[in-house]
Image (cartoon, rainbow, N blue to C red):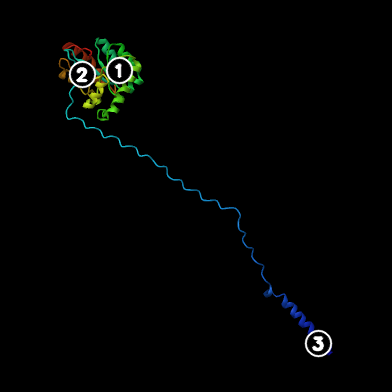
Amino acid sequence: MQARAVLATVLAVALLLSGCAQSDDNVTPAAAPQPVESTVPPTPPSPTPSPTPTRAKPPKPPLRPLPANLPAGLRRAAGVRPVALTFDDGPNPTWTPKVLDQLRAAHVTATFCLVGREAQRHPDLVRRIVREGHQLCNHSWRHDLDLARRPAADMRADLLRTNKAIQAAVPGAPVPFYRQPGGRWTAEVLAVAKDLGMRPLHWSVDPQDWDKPTAATIAKRIHSAARPGAIVLMHDGGGNRAATLAACPHVIADLKRRFGIARLT
């Protein structure tokens, strides 16, 4: 009996020791995986593009001031007793043919002061003007009221471009006159025109038909202001010229009766 008791005690101790060996407290946790260093080199950041430098435009030269009085040397009279009719701002496909019809019916001629870009657009009208015996005048490329205040090189280029457009329609036809838009003359534009072989053409009678008065008002103003040898300003372009067209028969008849009408030379 004593031997059995001893054996039982030994087995109990052995079982106890075996259970303790499997306790969680004695289990070593597995090591966490270590990060592996990448062998691919990192992509360098894109460089920030430098702003493209912008070239500053050179400042435009200042406009020269207009003189207090019109400069000397302007053509303001026909030089003979008959008056001269002048028409500005054409050729216009609506109004110029009708003005030409009236002049032809009255057997009189006039001077047409042509805007260059309009002459380029309507060369057939430039040809008709010359074919029917009228005089030509350069009136700048685009009716720039400030042209006479710009640098001399700009004025020269403008006048040459206008003459080129006119003479493209009528090769060899002379352009003996230049008229400054708005009558805003300077001594400098006179010098440029003269250097190009053109005489500066002004006027002595301005009915202000560009301001669209009635036909009766246009006729009355011309009748009151006209004198022997007057140069009369009217318009066949630059806007609605219905009133000018309506006034023309009365104006032409009145001037022919009182003074006669002649082409400028």
Mark 3 vs mark 1, foreground winner is 3
Density class for disc 2 (Cα within 10 Å; few <14, some 14-19, many ≥20) is many
Write down the quadrant of residue 100 in the picture.
top left
Which of disc 1 and disc 3 is earlier in sequence? 3
Q: Position of residue 52 (x, y in %)?
A: 42, 42
Rounded to the nearest angstrom, the CA distance separating label 2 from label 1 is 17 Å
What residue is drawn where x is 15% and y is 19%?
A: 225
Give the secondary structure at mark 1.
helix
Which of disc 3 and disc 2 is earlier in sequence? 3
The mark found on residue 96 in the picture is 1
Quadrant containing the N terminus is: bottom right
Report the residue marked by disc 3: 6
Q: Position of residue 43 (x, y in %)?
A: 55, 51
Does 207 sit left or right of 23 as displayed? left
What residue is drawn where x is 29% and y is 28%?
A: 153
Asked whether residue 111 appears in the rendered view, the answer is yes
Residue closest to the eye, 197 or 2? 197
Which of disc 1 and disc 2 is earlier in sequence? 1
Asked whether residue 185 appears in the rendered view, the answer is no
Report the residue marked by disc 2: 232
Give the secondary structure at mark 2.
strand
Contact between marks 2 and 3 (CB within 8 A): the answer is: no
When the figure is inspected, residue 11 is found, relative to residue 102, above or below; the finding is below
